[in-house]
Amino acid sequence: MAKKIINRVLVSIPVLIGVIFIIYVMLNIIPGNPIEVMMAEHARQDVIDRISAYYGLDKPVWEQFLIYMKNLLHGDLGVSYKLNRSVNSLIADAFPYTLKLAIAAAIVSWLIGIPAGILSAIHENTIVDRLFMGFSLLGVSMPVFWAALIFQYIFAYRLAWVPVSGADTWQSYILPAIVLGWSSAGTIARLTRSNLLEVLEEDYIRTAWAKGLSQAGVILHHAFKNALLPVITMMAIQVASLLSGAVITETVFAIPGIGRLAVDAITNRDMPLLQGTVIFTTILIIAGNLIADILYSVIDPRIREK
Amino acid sequence: MSDLKHFRPDTAFGGKNEKRDLTSSAKKAQDPDAKLSAKDKKRIQLAADLGEAETGWDKFKILCSENKLAAASAVIILVIALMAIFAPVVAPYDPTKQDLLHRLEGMSAAHIFGTDQLGRDVFSRMIYGARVSLVIGLLPTFLSLALGTVLGLISGYLGKAADFVIMRLADITMAFPSLLLAMVVMYTLGAGIVNIFLALTFVSWAGTARVIRSQTLSLREMEYIEAARSMGVSKWRIMFQHILPNCLPNLIVLFTLNIPGSILSESSLSFLGIGAQPPMTSWGLMVSDGKQYLFTDPVVAIAPGVAILILALAFNFLGDGVRDVLDPYLNKQ
């Protein structure tokens, strides 16, 4: 078991290095000195040279990459061009907002997705099933930014139940969490439904029915536990993707999280900041997948023993 | 000729059906009275009906009556496509013509969805915007599918180093959050429509490559491939003429189901201001323009969003229907 986990961790290291390499190459093949581009014609050449040297841009690209990798191993993501602050501190400031939003959205998606999945499975091919599955397809087909605007218009502007945007109070997280959670709720509902349907065909479920257990007893006590295994691992992946997928939600609701940071970095052509945010979120996702894999083998004895 | 035509498994369904029988025959033998669910029975009936159908048109009619939602979705997509193609004829106004005296007018008989902040007719702009959404929905999906298919075939059939390199690249691509990766590509290439094609292709080839690879791995062990190999057919010819046709049903399903993702990604990128650029119109860009006026004139932002939703939903329903027909035993999730 321990060996398996160590193996799995080792496998993700090359992926991580590949990710960093690709991001670095993509962001650094743009020709021209970014400092020159930012300052345009307003600066003297010696000023541009000095600032370029400060950011290490006077060295050859391969040397820049090695320096970047060395700093990265020390946990240093560099300095933002635009804000002249370390990318680490910018991410550290932004991450709590993203984390709060992701957790709230995950809770919303579980609270909607799991019951919806169970109900659709129990009432397979009835109007209830179609309604829930249609609803989940709606969540997947809906542009997030548009849903966010509609929710803002109805609940924040018309009904004035919650703040329009910002991240000052816990109420400001309600709308973003629902918007972000809805589309994951659809995925969770579909997964719960299909797994439960599969489990309900098993012999031990027939035995449970034959014993005369109530529907709630069979579904919740016997079937649900086994149907939930893949859903739990899905959740680990989902939390990771929520942490990175909040770009649009954060932009519309003006939450100063990681996604906002990435969008601002693109607008300001702030390469180190963009690089830092993308690498940071990708590490989160790889970690999330890793945890999902390990969790799967920990909670499922059949896989553990293999 | 017409007789010959009758024997040919000329729908992808026939090919799939045969393959399934081969692979699951062992399982069936062990468990002869494995009961068929009502849904499977229905599918088998459907297959029989399709086999009896004389012409393609009959088959089409059977499929439409079988899944009305998918048929309705196909009609909606067709209508949107026709409107986009004949935009100059259909659109009531010139989409770029400004009329600053009549800005943000709201819904009226003259302007169904009102006018935007520059007095341009929102409905006409939506019709022209449909061109972007449809092209973006179809083209990058097709390109990424083609790229993923070629890489998946190579990876699965040649194996060894090629397999290792391609699959590790796929791992890396799939490790990225896709919207962020597309944003990075757009940052590097700059905003614009052609760059969206490249960004979305780059982001989404890996899933296809994995599916095709695993299918190639099982197909390459089949006897007809061994026969082809022993007759001296070249590797590439086996890959593209013998294996690829058997992957087609999967590819068609993947194609339809990946389209909504491309449409939504484009609209998201355009919404963030790094996708389609003015004077071009895109539904995502229109929502982005309209969002400032959300509380005073919500229609400007909401109407193009509804259009995105309808198109994405239609492709999702159509994709589900196509999957039900082409891949009866594909595990539904």
Image (cartoon, grey):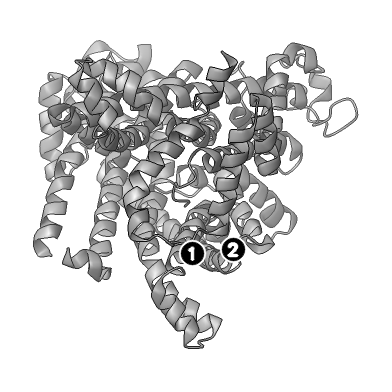
Q: Nearer the viewer, residue B174 or A165?
A: B174
Q: Which residue is mark 1?
A: A197
Outermost residue, bottom direction?
Answer: A212
Q: Quadrant of the N terminus of chain A?
A: bottom left
Give the amino acid at mark 1: Leu
Write the residue at 48% across / 50% down.
A255
Q: Which residue is mark 2?
A: A124
Residue B83's x, y, as percent? 73, 20
Q: Quadrant of the C terminus of chain A?
A: bottom left
Left or right, residue B82 beside residue B323: right
Left or right, residue A96 beside residue A18: right
Residue A124 vertical position relative to residue B303 in the rendered view, above or below: below
Left or right, residue A74 beside residue A148: left
* Cβ atoms under marks 1 and 2 closer than 8 Å: yes
Write the residue at 24% across / 31% down.
B156
Count of numbered tags? 2
Residue B67 at least partly seen: no
SS category of the residue bearing label 2: loop
Give the quarter of the image for residue A199.
bottom left
Residue A105 has which mark?
A: none
Q: Nearer the viewer, residue B280 or A42?
A: B280
Residue A267 vertical position relative to residue A45 in the rendered view, above or below: below
